[in-house]
Image: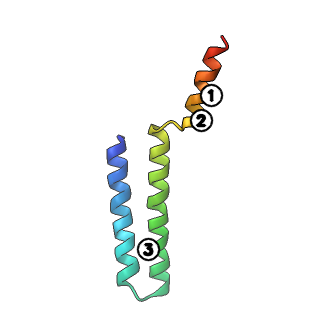
Amino acid sequence: MSLEAMLIIAAVLFAIGLYGSLARRNVLAVLMSVELMFNAVNLTAVSLSRYVVPFRLAQAGLDAGDEV
């Protein structure tokens, strides 16, 4: 799956959770909606970690290549 598709899915999940947390009066439903928003944020973090290489890892790879 592409990064764009994963981010769209996460945005839809977050929007559903936001609507549920603002529109519901039941505490359990609000907590479930907040959990859905947390899952959307986690999905975004995981999908970004697959496509974006952290700077320190890239720098460590470049430094290891210089030693050869």
In percent of width and height, residue 31 lies at 50, 78
| Badge number at residue 40 | none
- The answer to whether 67 appears left or right of 10 in the picture is right
Q: Label 1, on which residue?
A: 60
What residue does disc 3 label?
Answer: 33
Badge 3 or badge 2: first in the primary sequence: 3
Numbered badge on residue 56: 2
Amino acid of disc 1: Ala
Q: Residue at x 66, y 10 (%)?
A: 68
Please provide percent x and percent y for residue 30.
45, 80
- The residue under the point 32% across, 45% down is 4
Q: CA distance from mark 3 to mark 1?
A: 40 Å
- Residue 30 or 61: which is nearer the viewer? 61
Amino acid at dot 2: Arg
At 45% from the left and 46% from the top, the residue drawn is 47
Tell me which amino acid carries mark 3.
Ser
Between marks 1 and 2, how big is the CA–CA gap? 6 Å
Which element carries disc 3, helix, strand or loop? Answer: helix
Please report contact status of discs 3 and 1: CB closer than 8 Å, yes or no: no
Dot 3 crowding, Cα within 10 Å, few <14, some 14–19, many 20+: many
